[in-house]
Image (spheres, rainbow, N blue to C red):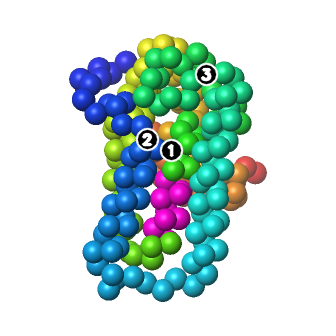
Amino acid sequence: MTPHPPAHPLELKVPPLLVAFATAGMMWWLAELLPSLVMTIPWRGGFVVTVCGIGILCVLAGAYEFRRVKTTINPTKPTTTSTIVTAGIYHRSRNPMYVGMLMVLVGWAIALAHPLSLLFLPLFVTYINRFQIIPEERVLAGRFGTEYERYRESVRRWLRYHPRRHTKSALHLSCFRGKVAPTLTLPNP
């Protein structure tokens, strides 16, 4: 097991929902500051409703699974987790609630129709990864050991996607533990 960097004072301190609202506020502020860059997006309303709706469903599905197994939903106290949730939407993502928040922010960026608002999306992902997800993973690995490690290796942090299920052959990049390696998938004869 690799050594972990020392804890940062911001780790697990700011609730992710508050981070999402702050990000949305900064996106709006930038759009108001530079209104001349606002774009026209055909069917913008439909895109906003669809993307935000899917995001909200991801958040609700994640919260439902936590409640179903009676474990904590408080993201600032992962030490009180009673079980690893692997069913339902957690089969596709280890962090569906954060994926949902990101999708709502994407919908908000579409609603603002301001290209610079998109710059805040990678900042949100970076913050959530560094100060929320990585510390959560550290706690869960310490608390549940190999059970959590197996889950972590089988389900991606953000989204699980298998190109082989969708194409007969594909050249794609697979990301494993921070390293990117090209993989050639050939059809079975």
Which residue is disc 2 drawn over?
Answer: 16
Identify the amino acid type marked 1.
Tyr
Which quadrant of the rendered structure holds the N terminus?
top left
Q: Nearer the viewer, mark 3 or mark 1?
A: 3
Q: What secondary structure predominates along the stretch shown in magenta?
A: helix
Which stretch did the figure color magenta?
A: 102-110
Tell me what residue is drawn at x 46 percent, y 17 percent. Answer: 79
Which residue is disc 3 drawn over?
Answer: 71
Residue 95, above or below 162: above
Which residue is disc 1 drawn over?
Answer: 98
> How far separated are the C-alphas under marks 1 and 2?
8 Å
How far from the left and from the top, in percent, is residue 140? 48, 20
Answer yes or no: is residue 86 visible: no
Tell me what residue is drawn at x 32 percent, y 67 percent. Answer: 29
Confirm or deny contact between disc 1 and disc 2 (CB under 8 A).
yes
Q: Earlier in the sequence, mark 2 or mark 3?
A: 2
How far from the left and from the top, in percent, is residue 68? 71, 27
Secondary structure under tag 2 reads helix
Local packing at callout 2 (Cα closer than 10 Å; few below 14, some 14-19, many 20+) is: many
Q: Earlier in the sequence, mark 3 or mark 1?
A: 3
How far from the left and from the top, in percent, is residue 94? 55, 36
> How far separated are the C-alphas under marks 3 and 1?
17 Å
> How far separated are the C-alphas under marks 2 and 3?
18 Å
Identify the amino acid type marked 2.
Pro
